[in-house]
Each structure stands twice: as structure tokens, then as C-alpha cells.
Image: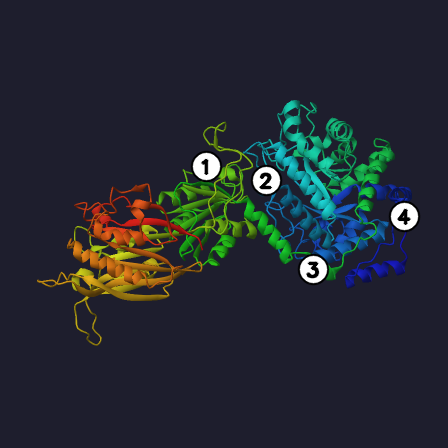
Amino acid sequence: MELTRRQTLGLAAAAVAGTTVAATTTADATPDRWVRDTLRRMTLEQKVGQLFVCYAYGPAADTADARNTSLYGVATPAEVVAKFNLGGVIYFTWTDSTKDPQQIARLSNGLQEASLTNTGIPLQIGTDQEYGSVVRVGPPATQFPGGMALGATRSAAYARSAGAIAGRELKALGITTDFAPDADVNVNPLNPVIGVRSVSSDPALVAELVAAQVKGYQRDGGVVSTAKHFPGHGDTATDSHTGIPVIGHTLDEWTRIDLPPFQAAIRAGIQSIMTAHIVVPALDPSGDPATLSRPILTGILREQLRFDGVVITDSLGMQGVRDKYGDAEIPLRAIEAGVDQLLMPVDPGLAYNSVLDAVRSGRISESRIDESVGRILTLKRGTGLVDHPYVDLARVAKIVGTPANYAEAQRIADRSTTLLRDDAALLPLSPAPRTILVTGYSPTNLAAALQARGATAVVKDTGTTPTDAKIADAVAAVADLTVVLTNKAWDTEVTDKQAKQQKLVNALLATGRPVIVVPVRDPYDVAYFDPAPTTLVTYGSTAPSMEALAKVLYGEIAPTGKLPVDIPTKADPAKAMHPFGHGLTFDPRRTRLTVASYNIHAGAGEDNVFDLDRTAQALKALDADVIGLQEVDVHWDVRSQWLDTLSELATKLGMHSAFAPIYDLDPPAAGQPRRQYGVGLLSRFPLIRTENHSITRLSTQDPNPVPAPAPGFLEAEVDVRGRRLHVYCTHLDYRADPSVRQMQVADTLRILAQDRKKDLQVLVGDLNAEADAPELAGLWTRLTDSWAAAGSTTGGPYTYPAVAANKRIDFVTVGTGLTVRHAEVPAEVPVAQAASDHRPMIADLTFRP
């Protein structure tokens, strides 16, 4: 039917005002009747136009763009729709179609007006919104994890909810068709075009989640879902954008591997299926790609699988379909094969006229065209597009990117993060502030998430092809921890031809510093680096995925993702480095805390010369949240070069410090530093309070020592996730007098008793006694000896195996509520690099907030 001028103006006004107006082509109660009547009144030109889905340049329907003029001979998107009687359009970022929700919705209304004015038939508007690595509509639209991330959750419920929300958001923008989900089974790790777009390498898992996505998109979200790429693009090492892949599956293999997801999608009511530009000799020995294959599209998809929805080609501009035939012949062979819609021909005018000529010449019957147009009209009528072609601009913000939608995307991302290895026992990190180098591919989102947790993020974005200069810059960065993100680092054919991402990761690992390696796309990357002790995979780099990664790193949530694919070794693809289903976890209810004790002996090695840089290097290597220090010299002439040693170390390490003098060797003098000797504390956590308590001592400065109270028992309070932590540091006498030690233990217990019962307590220091000395029994009753509690330790039978068993120099003890995971004395370093002739002791602790 034709629109009157008044009707046309009314529709235009509705588009501008943003109100929802029913089309003047309102269907009758019987959908078939509307389809029959519409088909009967259409001209051949209009029918052929319905077969085409093309793009148009410009953010608004009336925006003139020279690219349109060059390609179509008309300037505006509205004129493109009208000139070719288009049945559909497709939105891309590069066509300026998806700048923001309001712009998209206005463009959709404008294009619908153009189509209704021209043919009286609403336009099918589609886009590729698979999420993950294929996204056309960015934030503030909700950004869900992609197919393989969903596979890592193993949750059909999440797959359906993601599809439902995505469908509702797209529909609010006037996008009526989503070319998703990807139903391919990615059994080839070297697949350059599918990869994480696929749910899994397991056909059953792909089938289950694809069916759930289809229900989400269509039943819950109200948009057309399109399963792709039939008959299955998962086992190829060739990108069909640039070449023609050949799938070597036998019929049995295809039936077992590739078919199940498409069967599941059809059973779930899929309304559209996209073809693949792949050759499958077992299904059609002619050598034609599936898009042009009648045995595949008609024989298998239509007749065997009984699919009677709309079949749409993948882009006809891809090399996989253009290798064998010319651009005028391709649309004809596609229609003859059983295709209904032709997506993005290289030369739209040539393709459109070629189909017209083929019908007029009798090569293709008009009844064959009617068959496809009937399906297309049925699709439009069945989804409500005929009755409601316009969207309400006032409702866009109420539907797109809502807090509830964001929260669901975050829940899904939280469940997808997969921990592959943690041999270095880095995870979870303690909540202590630290400096973290975030480098590699697109590190900004992760850096923001880490900074929100108190970290100082040093960002070095090196992209997918790092230069040697950027690699050197990242390696030279100073940080407590490095997180390096990779994107298809395995792909040295297209993505990273010189393997520079691999070089970056290996260079960072070679530094010996703590490094966490995270492929943020294909998990297969991990097989292409030197062995990385700590590796995770996120399957995507969007903000929700990076927020989920930060949560896992800090132990706010447990990693629960399970690999949806095998990760084969690089040397032997038949051997799995990590098998399907692999995924480590930990208890997120426990907060981690690392405490060290170190007698720095004035910061001197055997050369007895204080070296600030050498000392800082040794302390940094401990990677501890709290470090208790003994024998700290402050302003002590040549021993400390008149430096405030502890303050200098704190500045170099970016930590907070506290000092408690045992000996104050100079009288107060205005403007003069005082030589002091005592104990100190370095903490990544801000210090809430410090106090220097007195305990019984024997002064080594007195030729006739008498036990007496003396300072040098340092207390510092910090807050760790809502728990008050008291850290005490002491340096006890070198005189092995049990009676003095007994008094010191009594003093220690008296000081500890002042804390609230629910507070956490840690005592670090050095002690000249065997662990089973009877005078220490009261101390061990109140506190746990970390060295003994660890069960498995490294470094020898004592905390520090000094010259004798009763010189148990460094220790870390803990009070109720703290659990000892591990304790060790780190391996000795050469004297030239050592900051002390003592050795530190480190305890890895956890507690429940």
C-alpha cells in the first residue's frame, strides 16, 4: 500500500519526537494473510530489494556522505534504502552507525521512515553484537563476556540472561536482528577467525549454550537471533575474510562435531542462520563454498534439518566466497543454493541488477524469489516489526545500560575468569597497597580496577605488536608486581608477525620479579611463552572482564571458570598443556597477608659497609606486606652515613615506616640528628598508630648489666579489610639467660593482652633460644610459631639456622585468627648483593575478615 503525504509527515514527526507510532502497514490478525497481500502487491524490484542487507555511511538517515555516493550513487542512508528497496541494513562502527544510544535509535527511526515511505515495508536492521571480541554497539550499552567466556562459566542460565538483556537493549535502539550467537565448535586452536567467539571445543557444551542464547535473544529479548556460520567454521586455520578455508571433516566427524549446535539452535526456534564461506568436501565435493552450495543449504539445512527460517549469507565481500566466481554471479548462485538474504555485496548495484536480470531472463524464477521474500516478510511480521517499526527515544536510557544489566554482565564475567597456574603462590594478593605494572594489550581497564583497590598502577600499553623500545620500557619499570595482558600472541601470521608479544612476556619473566600472565582473548597464548608460574585467562578485555580479573587477583572472589577448550603445547599439538575442564581455585573467604622479619645488621654485608640500594633491593625481593627490621641504625656516622636509614628505605620502597629506638646515644640538641639504634617496621598498609613499649632488657652497653625495663618493643596498628592488625617488632638480648627471657616473655604477654580479643596479632623479631626452651612455653601458648606451624618450610630446621641451634635469629609468630600457609627462609644471595649477613624469614598468612 502507498502512504499518503499526511501519513508520511506524521511518521516523520513521530521519529523526531521519539514517540512510538504503529506503522500504517498494520497486519491483520492472520500473519499469513499480511504476508500474502504484501507479496502480491510488490513489484519485482521491491522483491529483489528485500533480499539485500547492506550498510550505509552516516550517523543519521539524512546525512550526506561521499562514501555513499561512491558506492551507491546517492548521498544519504535514506536514499540508499529507497534506491535499492532494501530489505535490511547492517550497522558498523566504521559506518558511523553506532556512536551512542540516542544516535542509533534516531538513525533506526529515520531509516524505517525511508523504507516505509518507499515500499510500505519496515526495514530489518541488524548488527554483529556477539560480545567479547565482536562488538558493534559499545558502552553505555551493556558489554557482556563473549562466547568462550560463557563456556567457561558452564552456565546455560547465564547464556540465556545475557541474550535476553542484549536483545532488549538492541531492540530499544531499533536493531531488530542480532547476527549472533556463534555456533561454531572451535576444535582448531590455530583458528584465526573464530577462537573465543566460539563457546567451546566440546559440541555438547556449544549446543547447550547456543540454544540458551537463542531463547534469550528471541523469546526474552524480542529480536531475531542468527546462528552462524553453517555448516561450521570451527576447524580451520584459514580466515575466510582473506581466503577460502577447506574443512577436512568426514561426514561422521561433521555430524558429531559441527552439527549439534545448529540442531540445538533449530530446536530452540532460531529464526535465522548465517552461511559460512567454507568448502566441506564431505558435504559437497564440488569445491563450492557452503554459501553457494545447494547440497549443503537446501539438501542438508532445509530438507534434512527442516529449517524453514531465513538463511542469510556471511558478507559477500569476503574472499572466501569471491575466489571462484565473479561478483555478479555470486548472488545468483547463493539464491540457487537456497539463500534468502544477501549480505553486503561488494558492488550493490551490480548484485541487485544481476538478480533482476536473472529473473527477467528466466534463470531464476520469480516464484523462487517469492519463496525467500515470503520468509523475510514472515520474519518481520512475527517479531512485531510490522506493527511497531519505530522506537521510543524517551525509553532508550531506561533500557540500555542500566545498573541491573551491568550487574548481570559483571556476575557472568566473575564466573568466567579461569586460573590456569599459580606455582609461585602469588594468589590471592593481599589487600595491601602496592605498585603494579600493568602492561601488554589494552591495560587501561585493569589498571583502573586495580587502582580502585588501592594499588598504584604503572600503565605501559604495548598493544599487539610491541616495539623493542616499548618492551625495554616495560621491563625497566619499577613495581612490586607485573601483570602482562596478551591478545592472540600465538598468531604470528596476522596479529603479531614478529612475535613481539611473546618477546615481551619472556623478557618480563626473565627479570625474576613476580609476573602474572593473562591472555585476555585466546587462552592458547600460554603455550607460546616461557613457563609462567602464574597464569589466568579472561577470554575478553572489556571492563567487566577486567573487573572480574581484579577481584580474583585480590581474592574478593574465587576463580571458578573452567577451560572450555584444550590448550595444546606448542611443540606437540597432540599433547595438552592444560586440558578441557581445567581451572584452579582458592578460598576467597580468607584474606592473605605476608609478613617478614629481617635483621639488617646496619644494612651491611660481610664488608660491613652500609649500602642503602643494596638493602632496599633485598627488602623489595621479599615482596612482603609488613617487614619487621632489627638492628636499625639511624644517623649513626659512617655506619649509616648519617642517614635516617628507615625513612630512606621507606621512600625507596614506597612503604610506610615506624621506628622504636632501643638506644638513644646522643643528648637532644637543636637541629642535630641523634644517633639511634633500634627496631623498625615497613608496611604497605598505612599505619594507624605506633607505640614503643618497654620490656625487660640486659643492656649490652653496661659492663655490669642488670635486668631492667627498656624501650625497643615496637607496636604498629594497621587496618586490613576491616580487621585491626597489631604488629609487634622486637630485638631481644644476645645473652642466653633463661631468667631474663622468662621476664621478657611475661612482658610480651602483658603488652599483647592489652589488645581486643577480636584483633589480629603478629610478633616478629629475633630470639636467642631453641623453640622448645621451657621459658618460652607461655609465648607459644599465646602465639603460634609460624616456622613450626607451616608444616613444610624451606631454609633449614630453624627459622634462621645461625651458628647454633639456640641462635634462632629471626621469627614470625601469630595470634588467634591467623593461619600459616607457608614459611621460608629465602635462598641466600651472593655477599656482594646481600644487605645483611643475616637471612630473613617470611610467613605467608591468611585470616577471615
Compared across the picture, whether 508 is left or right of 268 comes to: left
Compared across the picture, whether 132 is left or right of 815 comes to: right
The local crowd at label 2, few if under 14, some if 14 to 19, many if 20 or more residues have their Cα within 10 Å, is many
In three-dimensional space, the C-alpha distance between marks 3 and 4, rounded to whole angstroms, equals 31 Å
Give the residue displayed 23% in from the left and 47% down from the top.
772
192, above or below 734, in the image: above
Looking at the rendered image, the quarter that the C terminus falls into is: bottom left
**Earlier-in-chain disc, 2 versus 1:** 2
User: Which is more foreground, mark 3 or mark 1?
Assistant: 3
In three-dimensional space, the C-alpha distance between marks 2 and 4, rounded to whole angstroms, equals 43 Å
Name the mark on residue 28: 4
Mark 4 and mark 3 in contact (Cβ < 8 Å)?
no
Q: Nearer the viewer, residue 458 or 415?
A: 415
The local crowd at label 1, few if under 14, some if 14 to 19, many if 20 or more residues have their Cα within 10 Å, is some
User: Dot 1: what SS?
Assistant: helix
**Earlier-in-chain disc, 2 versus 4:** 4
Image coloring type? rainbow
Give the amino acid at mark 3: Lys
In the rendered image, which residue does mark 1 sit on? 528
In the rendered image, which residue does mark 2 sit on? 154
Give the amino acid at mark 4: Asp
**Earlier-in-chain disc, 1 versus 4:** 4
Name the mark on residue 398: 3
Q: Position of residue 618 (x, y in %)?
A: 28, 51
Question: Can residue 381 be seen at all in this image of the molecule?
Answer: yes
In three-dimensional space, the C-alpha distance between marks 2 and 1, rounded to whole angstroms, equals 26 Å
